[in-house]
């Protein structure tokens, strides 16, 4: 069996942004690939690295665009098909995919406060 190391991948669960931010650099822009099967690419910009405040837990999302696609939607092509289907009430799979996605999905919706809560959910105490 081939290991992640042999493929040149890094375990993102052990990587900290503070390890990536270079001293003296004002911003860090990088691409993160999520779900290697569907290959979602996200562009992230670290605006600043500031000393930790013990009263504040974790990172904060300052902005973004559009809703996160449902998990396992099938990558970029599956997502495009999903959006076409949920927008068309006459499509054969409309009801099935609306229910699968939780009953409501707005691809243009984005809330930085919700994104911040979701990022912090998986952090250790």
Image: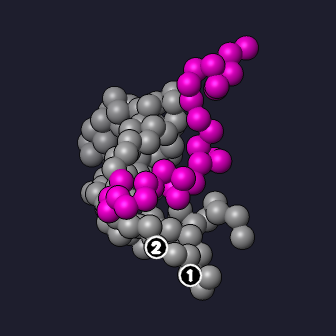
Q: Residue at x 45, y 55 (%)?
A: 21
Using the image, determine if residue 88 lies above or below residue 113: above
Q: Residue at x 51, y 75 (%)?
A: 51
Per the rendering, the mark at residue 5 is: none
Quarter containing the C terminus = bottom right
Residue 59 is situated, as x and y percent measured from the top left of the image, at 50, 68
Q: Residue at x 45, y 37 (%)?
A: 33
SS label for mark 1: loop
Comparing 39 with 74, the one in front is: 39
Residue 14 painted magenta:
yes
Residue 11 painted magenta:
yes
Residue 13 is situated, as x and y percent measured from the top left of the image, at 63, 47
Taking the image as shown, residue 70 lies to the left or right of residue 19, namely: left
- Magenta region, residue range: 1-28
Residue topped by disc 1: 53
Comparing 104 with 74, the one in front is: 74
Per the rendering, the mark at residue 50 is: 2
Residue 103 is situated, as x and y percent measured from the top left of the image, at 45, 56
Q: Is residue 96 visible?
A: no
Using the image, determine if residue 87 lies above or below residue 52: above
Q: Residue at x 48, y 50 (%)?
A: 20
């Amino acid at each position: 069996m081939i290991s992640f190391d042999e493929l040149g991948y890094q375990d993102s669960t052990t990587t900290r942004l503070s390890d990536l931010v270079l001293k003296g650099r004002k911003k860090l822009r990088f691409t993160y690939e999520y779900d290697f099967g569907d290959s979602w690419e996200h562009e992230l910009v670290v605006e600043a690295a500031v000393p930790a405040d013990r009263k504040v837990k974790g990172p904060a999302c300052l902005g973004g665009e559009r809703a996160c696609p449902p998990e396992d939607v099938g990558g970029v092509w599956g997502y495009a098909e999903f959006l076409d289907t949920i927008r068309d009430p006459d499509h054969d799979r409309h009801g099935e995919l609306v229910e699968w996605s939780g009953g409501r999905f707005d691809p243009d919706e984005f809330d930085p406060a919700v994104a911040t809560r979701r990022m912090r959910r998986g952090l250790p105490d």
